[in-house]
Structures are given as C-alpha cells and as structure tokens.
Amino acid sequence: MRFYLTGLFLLSVALISGCAGIATDEPELLPVSDNNAVTVLADAARVDAANGKLDAAAASFERALRIEPRNPALWHELARLRLQQGQYQQAEGLAARSNGWAGGNKALRAGNWRIIGQARLKRGDYPGAQSAFDKAAEQAN
Amino acid sequence: MENPWFDKLRHFVTRKRLRLALLSLALLLSGFVLYLDITVRTQFEGKRWALPARVYARPLELYPGLKLRPEQLGAELAMLGYRDAGGQLDPGSFRQQRDEFTIATRPFVFWDGAQAALQLRADFGGGHLRSLTDLKMDKPVTLARLDPLLIGGIYPAHNEDRALVRLNEVPPVLIKGLIAVEDRQFYTHHGVDPRGVARALVTTLRGAGLQGGSTLTQQLVKNFFLTPERTLRRKFTEMIMAQLLEMHYSKEEILEAYVNEIYLGQDGNRAIHGFGLASHFYFNRPLSQLDLPQAALLVGLVKGPSFYDPRRHPARALARRNLVLQEMRQQQAITQQQYVTARITPLGVAEQAPGGTSLYPAFVELVHRQLRRDYREDDLRSEGLQIFSSLDPLAQFSAERALTTRLTQLEKARRIPPKALEGAVVVTNTQNGEIQALVGGRNTRYEGFNRALDTERPIGSLIKPVIYLTALERPDTYTLATLLDDSPLVWRERGTADWEPRNYDKVFHGQVPLRLALANSYNVSSVRLGLALGVRQVMDGVHHLGVERDLNAYASSLLGADGLSPLEVTQMYQTIASGGFRVPLRAIREVLTADGQPLQRYSLSVEQVIEPGPAYLITSALQGVVREGTADGLNKYLSPDLHIAGKTGTTNDLRDSWFAGYTGDRLAVVWVGRDDNQPINMTGASGAMTVWGDMMASLDPEPLMPPAPDNIELVWIDSATGHRADESCQDVVSLPFIHGSAPVETAPCATHAQGQSIKDWFKRLFE
C-alpha cells in the first residue's frame, strides 16, 4: 500500500512537472519529431544557436525542414532564430508559416503569435504587435 | 691575290669596331635575359591558376523512413559513378542484393563540415529506406549523405579546367614514371639537358623537324609563357627561361607547377589540365588513390592526350602505358614483380567522364545567373568556388524523359514535323522554393537557348487563378459559390476595336458558379469578373505573387495576352502552392571557397502576401480544375486521391500549351510550343498536361492536403442554385467558405432550418 501511495505521489509529481513544462510554454522543449534524423538535426541546430552559431543553426533547421516540410515546430524554431538575428520580417513570415501547420497545438500557436508580436514591435508596428499579442493570449483560453 | 672588296672589309672591321659590336651584342643579350628573368619571376610567383566554379547537385540524404525505392538509389549511385564492387569495398563502390545495398561512400566536405568515408548498409521495404547501418561501427545510422553529383562548372577563358593538387598528394610512383619517361636527368640538370639538346639537334639537322629533348622545366616554360609555334628563336628563349626558372626555384616547386599545368585531355570544349583533374576525368577517383598502372597511363598521356586517348583508342593507350612501365622498370623505378602485375592489369578507365561539360546545362545556367547577382564574373571563373545547388537528379531525369518522349509522341499523333515541337519544364519544392529540375528544351544537353528562362510566351488561362484569387480576397462579395455571368460580352475601349471574348467551346453558359467558371476555364465570365475587379488590380495581383516584369493592363490581359517565361510562371504559382507565402525560387543553397570554407548561404525566405483564407480557397478551386474541369484528364496519370491542384493554359490559335500544377510536395510548370510560334493545335490539357502527368507519375507525389485555416468552414451547397442545402437536396457539394461569407439563402430543396453548417448537418444525422 505504501509502495502504491509512493508510486502515486511520484506519478503526480511527474505529471505536474510535465504540465508545468507545457504551461511555461516552451514548445521547443518537446521532441520536434518522431523521425530521428529530424530530431538529430534540430538538436544540432539548438546547440549551434546556443553557441551563437546562428547561421549554422539556420542551415540545420532548413535541412530538417527538407525532410519534414510540414513540421510546425521546425518552422517555429527557425522563426525564433530569425528574430534573434534581427531578421524581423523573416521571423514573422516563418512564424505565420508555422501557424499554418500548427493545427490544434495552442501552445505553439501562442508562441508563434508572440514571435510575430515581437517582430512587429521591433519594426515599430505597435498596433500590429498588440493585435498579435492579443491573439497569443486568445490561444491560452 | 687581290680582292678589293675583302680589303675594304678588313679595313672596316678593325679590332675596335669588332669589340664594340660584340659589346653591344652582349648588352642586347643581357637586356633580353634580364627581361626574360623578370617575366619568369613575376609570372611564376604571381601564377594563380584560374579555377572554375564547380556546381554540385543536392546530396542525397539517407535516413530510415526516407521515401526512396531501391532502383532510385541505384540510379543515384550510377550517376555518381559508384562501381559495382565484386570483392573489396573501396570508397565509391557498392554491392546490391535485392533490396539491400552495401555502400562505401566517398569522403566529402559539406557546408556544415566533413563527412568521412562510411560503409553503410541500406535496407529497403515498402517503398521506403527501412534501416541504415554503419558496418564498421556496427550500429544504426540516423542520417548520412552521399557525396553530391558534380553537374558542371563555370569555366575560365579557354575553358581550362583543373583540380589543384599539392606535390605531397601526388603518388610517388607517378613522379617516378614522369621522370623515367620525360626527363631522366630532372634532379641533376639546370633546366636544360645538354645530351637532350644534342640529340634534338641531330634529329633536327637530319631534317626530321624540331622535336624532343625538352626537360620537364622546358615543357613547363613552354606551357606557361610561350606560344606553341616551333621556331629556333622560340626554342632558344625557352632554354634561357628554363635555366632562369631553375636558378630561382627548387625542383619541388617546378615539379608541383608542372603536375598542375600539363594538358592531359579534352572533354567537349573543356580542356583537362593537371594530373589532379585527369585522375577524376579518367578514373573517377582522387589522384592520391591511383595505383601503378593508372599512374603510368596518365604519364603516358603527356606525350599526346588526343592520340593516346584511352576512351577512343584503348589499344594505343594500353601500348603506351606498358611502354611507360617498361621505362620505369629499366630505370629501376619499380620492381620486376610490380612491372609484371601492372602490365597485365586492364586500363580501368571509367566509362563516362564525370561532371565536366554539364549534363544539365540549362540548370547550371540558372545557377550562373543567380550567382552573377552576388559575384563578379571573373571570380566565378577563377576562384574555384564550390556551389551547392538544389538540383535533384532524379526529378531532373523524370522531367527530361517525360518532355522528350511526349514531344515525339505528340508530333506523331498530330502530324507535326519531327523536332518542330519544343518545350520547357520547371520543378520546385512547394514549401521552400528550391528548384529541383529545369529543362530548357528537348535537346537537354544543348547549351543554347534556354526556354525555361528566356522564352516569353502569352500565358493564356494560367492568369485566371489570379483573377479568381483577387475576387476571393473579397469574401463579402465573392465565394466559390457566387454565380458569375457568362453571357455575351462586348468590351468597348476608346482607341481600340470592340472586343468580344468567347469561350473555347464557343458556347455561353449563362449563370455559372465561380468555382466552375475557373474549373472549366470559361473566358467570358472570367473577363467580366476581372473587369468588375479592375484589370489593374488583377495585374497588381500578378506582381504580388512574385512576377517582377512590367505588365500591360488591357482587358485582353485578363486572358493572358502578356508573355512570361516558364520560370516566372513558376514563381507566380509558387506563392499559390505554398499557401499564400511568397518564397523566392532558389537554385543555390551554399557557396564554399575552393578550400572548403563557408562563404555564403542562400537561406529560405518566406513572406505572407495572401491571407490564409483566400489562399486556401484558390487551392480548393484549382483542385476542382483537376477533379472536374479542363484538367480532369490528369486522373488517367495520377490517382484522384492525390487531390492535385492545377491549371491548363492555351493561347490564341493554339500556339502555346501550358500546364501549372502542384501536389503536396512539388510544383511543376510545363510549356509546349514551337520556336517559330506556329500553331501546334494543342490545348494545355492535350499537350503540356500530358508531360506533367508522365513526369509526376514517376515521382511518387505526396497528396495535396493543405491545412484549413481557422476562419474556414465547410458548408453544403445546392449545385443548382448556389444556396445552402441540406440532406433533402439531391445535387449537393461541400465547399469551404471564409467564416460569415457562406450564402444565407437556403435552396428550395432544403426543408430544414437555415444557416446550418456542415457540422450541424452531421450532428443532425446522428441525432
């Protein structure tokens, strides 16, 4: 019985922390694909991005996208990278592309709208940014 | 004996004058030598060989789950020149047993780093690569690349091609052979071999012409600095320059220059220079991997690459090679055992020269043009840049085969003189805009007129999707169900004759639902719609989709009177196929320097120019063209389950036949017509579409299932009235609408409550 309770406790902890992962809305922490080739490329891209090798990271994401062109998580991460690089128009386009394939993935959609909002802010389009952030908030409901 | 003339001469030629004359001659000579010295030094030190830019196809990515058939991998390996190995697997060879390949890949430096040579086992099943294993490490491989196919070069003046090598990459046995045959005293002479000169002098005096006796240094001088004329004066200059060269540079430096400079073969108008490239050209392997008989063959070629060409004159080449081996044996450069073994080895020359004169000149030309935007022409022809393109040789093969075989069939079927029909094909990836294949004419190896880029033909009905897209961007007024007026129309415009557009079937169709007017490509209703929207607005729409050229805005422009190239049409349809995102078409992925350093990347770029809703609707309408419109014949080639979207285009008097269409993964545009612009008596469906169908059928297309944007709903519509229908109606169709734009009227056949969407309709079914 005690084992059972401990197990239940551990399970709930795992569930809560899992939910927390989703709630903090970091969709890039989820596995991007069940295709290992794509996962390997995305991981390499993240490492490159973390080390400031942004162009190499973009190249790996594009390579992954050739394998899975309909993977919204890949489009999203490439959008985030472009935002980081200051390529705001590209960031917005790529995030919109991600939204096209995102289906019912609300967390990802919200993330994309935030990228669009930030890109618009940087370009001085304040009303546009506000409407994008509103859309991001809508996804949370 | 008195000779007054002789006396005069003796009187004139005093000692003083003789000295003066000799001195002037010496001065003159030293001036000449000084001049030669400067020439030799500046040129030798400043000598940078012009290296062509090399263009590669995309590397084939291998990973478990990849959609690829064994025969496609076989075709790729054959194109790359991989040998079917019986025994040992060297890099660049493979073995196949049914659906299992064992491949020894070649090492290659890619944009993102080097991939060492691998030994891979690839298992196929169900049309997919099932597993990939590293045989040396005995573990699964997630992702590996084959080396990319070399598809051409952008060559320097005189079309000299070479692959530079350092002296330490040259097999010692090749150097030994070279010295044994061409210049035995190389390491001891000072540029000129007196015995050689004496020998040459004797043959020359015997009247056998000027020949032989050249040291390697002299040969280098001849190639480097001098013209090929054979005069005594030139021979003299050559000897002085050779000695000057030896004074300033080491034997190794001279030898390294020699192995890179020497002319060793011809491939069309491309000249093969240096042993580095010759090794690839004749044996399809790097110089460092050559064995003794192969090295001996290359050494033998120095004497006459054309006369001893191992592909055209194998017997002669074999005899020459064995002579080289014999010389090497006599000079003790090789052992008796080596000699005996090498002599009985076959020539081993690769049947086909790799790369070189491009198999895909039309595509390489496109690459060249895109590069010219960013690079100077001189740099492209001299810096040895490595260009990684997006060409997919498998798609290119399908496109070429479909075009050439279909054009021949069409000529026969329609009594068109043979070779009169021409065509062009462009194939792209719908998602990232990479050009995978490009055919510039039916003679696909021809480096001339590139129809895919340069022919400008009226696009006919290919313009219509732009009219309908412009309409669908106004959901308050136009939906797929909106009835259009297809009754007679007279267009009067000041300064032009009255214009009365007609339909292809010469019938007016009255009230036609918008989607069917497009599906059947009705001219009259389309023109009327375009006029209502504004011709300028429609033509702006063409620009919006990515066409840059200036366009007319006459009423006739609405029927595609303006000329575009197949590539421009592709750009226009790319935006539609990618769901309203303008994605610039790209043929280049990356550019590396000659020594493999990343220089530039052409990255994916997307910009949303059409709202997701209208973009979704126009694709849906174009799927209708194939399902039930002018392109329904495509279902003979490809399953209707692929939901392909497309549009036929036919121009006045049937001069041009177009088809543009896309699947879930590829967009392709095909043009068929005549260079002299004579009628070909074909519609878009009977000409270009048959090419498109053949090609796509061999490419295993992905089904087209665009995701529906949030603001799209499906509504049942009564076909007769275009109003809302329900289960009691007979002829109904489910159509997508932007929220709030579906008709509010209910068809007379519908008995239930108004304004129900398809969801409610299903709900009621199960209640």
Image (cartoon, coloured by chain):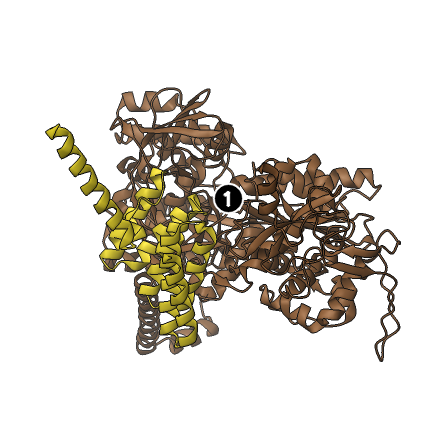
Chain colours: A yellow, B brown
Q: Residue furthest bottom?
A: B494
Please name whichever residue, B168 or B685, is drawn nearer the observer in this view of the structure: B685
Q: Residues within 10 Å of mark 1 (few under 14, many from 20)?
A: many
Residue to which mark 1 is pinned: B392
Q: Residue at x 82, y 44 (%)?
A: B416
> Callout 1, which amino acid?
Asp
Please name whichever residue, A97 or B185, is drawn nearer the observer in this view of the structure: A97
Q: Residue at x 72, y 47 (%)?
A: B751
In the rendered view, does B371 fall on the left or right side of B241? right
In the rendered view, does A4 fall on the left or right side of B503? left
Q: Residue at x 84, y 41 (%)?
A: B415
Q: Residue at x 84, y 80 (%)?
A: B494
Q: Looking at the rendering, which quadrant does residue B694 occupy?
A: top right
Relative image position of residue A75 (x, y in whole percent): 40, 53
In the rendered view, does B231 fall on the left or right side of B690? left
Please name whichever residue, B550 or B223, is drawn nearer the observer in this view of the structure: B550
